[in-house]
Image (cartoon, rainbow, N blue to C red):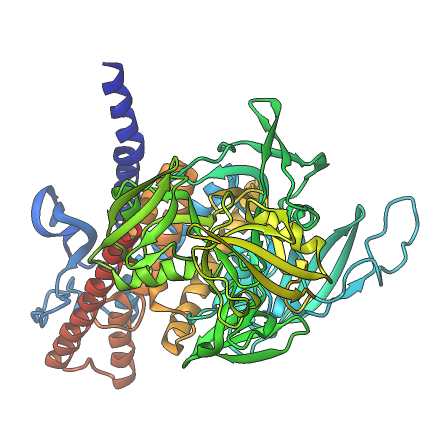
Amino acid sequence: METLITNFLAIWSHWVWPILLFVIGLGLVVFVHELGHFLAARAAKIKVERFAFGFGPRLFGFTRGETDYCINLLPFGGYVKMLGQEDVKEADQTSDPRSFNNKPIRARFAVISAGVFMNFVLAAVLFVLVAMVGKDYLAPVIGAVRPGFPAASAQIEWMAPPVEEGRGTTQPATQPCQTQGLLPGDRILNIEDHGFLLNYVSKPVTRFSDVTLVSTLADPDSSYLFTIQREVGGRKCIGKTRMGVKRLADDSQYAFGVAAASNTTFSRYTDLITASPFLDGDKLVSINGQAVAHSWQISGIEDRLTGAPVTVTVLRGGHELNITVLPRLYLRDDVLYLTDGTRLHCWPTGKDDGTMQCVTGDGKTITVDQSKIAGGAVRERLDILGLIPRIKVVAISKGSPADKAKIKVGDIVTGYGDRAAPSYWEFLETNRQHAGTGTNIVVLRDGAAKSLWVVPVEHDDVTLVGIADEPDPEHAVVAAVREGSPAAAAGIEPEAVIVAINDQPVDNWVQIYQQLKEDLGQDVRITYRLGARHQTAEIGRLDTSDFDPNDYRFDVFGREIAFRPLEVSLVYRNPLRALYWGARETCKLIVSTYVSLGRLSQGTVSAKALSGPVGIGAIALEAGRRSLVDLVYFMAFLSASLAVINFLPIPVTDGGHAVFLIIEKVRGKPLPGRLIYALQVAGLILIVGVFVALTWQDIARLLANRW
């Protein structure tokens, strides 16, 4: 009985209650819109024949006076049927003075516009409620800066800090901070440009979505004046910098190249199976005794690690707990190897017609022929002298092909398709070759080989099986040898097991890294086992052109663990401030929606960002699961967005009717009835086509996300 109650409560909280909230919220949005038409029609003394919620067959209702109030079968929308007013057929001519068509143009325009106006009012009211209750948003703090993007090379001019009370005037902060490039931890205070629209929606910046909104709606040639705050040694500095935007790789969207910051509380992915010792809700206190106050401090600590075990202190259940972990060794993201053995340091920023663009450390963009790329971080997670390790499964997505194939966390892949001990790049290649058909995968589990069958699937335009991996940390087994590398020149082959470097025994890849770092500048000899035979490979004198310890990094927490986003709570208890915020939020949404539609037509905003009814329902369910405040905020967003879309100049919509009235005012008479009818039918076909296309996109997206 207890289990039954628990299951019922889980279903209720995860599905039933959010769906009920969404239906109520959607009903409110539709009701308020139609109520606007209804009240305006009654004020103009127009006969209202029906006030309906939903479309299709009538389910139930009642008649009061001359109006039928009813609920129809399909609850997506609604309408007010007025005498003499039709959407998709020619209106009947009548001499009744209460007919819609017999009223002055200004009265008809007011009736048509009233629904949109009421949706704007509803959005503002809901936003005011959200403001007074309070809601958490992503803080406008930078968590990461993407190399090669404007934020990484922005020139910052530091200004005098504010005057501290009782201490007189402080000196200008000319040199307290790095002057080139935004840094993790920088807080964005303000964004300005010379245009009214974007300047209005982005000033001041109160949450990170303001930054994303500006870049998403930006023109390719636009530039923006940022005001940032940076803390150095306990001192807060204010700086200004002007930045443009850059197109993201394989996307039509533009970005500044900054990501939102996280806090120091662990967040376990709920859809992942992992063996991580860190639990959801653990709060990071220190790493090797060094206190961690902000998540962006972690990378600086990791840069000083040597590969030795790390002690991580977390706060769990009110008590501090020390957890010892082995850091993971990875190739840095800017390392790229060519087939002739050349090593480049550059960050990939895009691909085009068989070439790859990347940005060097000094900000120069170079183009590389993809056929000349032999390896690097774009292909492999780890590469030492051209020796590439096997992959180990560290997390599995629930319901994924890997989960269905009974692959387990901790498995080491020793065979996949026709490849023995595939590297990461070879694993991805095998995924693509066997997408939808399946192939055999062999894993090493508890010292024994296990053969399984897995079917890779297309997921967000790539072929995956649903695992998170890392280089096999326990075994120095070579999965692949990079073309043009020192290892290839020395004759080391795949499946070799590295046993010693300069006669010093090594058991794993961290020890290989440590020994090579120690032997830098000396002749290096690698001893390895291939089958039953031990062999020796002469690498020669080792210098940084072949092996540079700075090309590698250690990762303490791994890819299966994340930190919760850094949030800021916005709450306005004062009703007047809440009213101002609600009105501004509504105006911001109206402006950004119109600008988004314009950018969509220009191709700078992708149609993939749009959602249809299924997608809107999914977003609403997620909002309802988080909190009632989140759902109210989303319904306010939906109310304003639908109002904007409904007033577009498309026949059948309120905006289309408004255009017909404007034309009638200019011509002195309405358009011919047959022409209006034909335009309305065309508009209906267009809307239905968009509706079907977006619904299909929504369903495909949901199916892809659920494997």
Tell me which residue sits at (68%, 73%) in the image. Answer: 362
Looking at the image, the residue that sits furthest to the top is: 1
Quarter of the image for residue 662 reads bottom left
> Residue 295, percent across and down?
62, 45
Of 27 and 466, nearer the camera is 466
Looking at the image, the residue that sits furthest to the front is: 533
Tell me which residue sits at (16%, 62%) in the image. Answer: 98
Quarter of the image for residue 611 reads bottom left
Task: Judge from the rendering whether residue 340 lies leftward or rightward of residue 291; answer left or right.
Answer: left
Q: Relative to residue 365, is residue 442 depicted above or below? A: above
Q: How many marks?
A: 0
Of 665 and 164, nearer the camera is 164
> Residue 438, percent across and down?
22, 55
Q: Relative to residue 578, is residue 95 depicted above or below? A: below
Q: In which quadrant will I find the N terminus? A: top left
> Residue 386, percent across and down?
53, 63
> Residue 112, percent across and down?
27, 64
Q: Relative to residue 198, is residue 41 depicted above or below? A: above
Q: Is residue 494 visible?
A: yes
Of 698 and 342, nearer the camera is 342
Q: Relative to residue 281, is residue 33 depicted above or below? A: below
Q: Is residue 52 visible?
A: no
Of 59 and 102, nearer the camera is 59
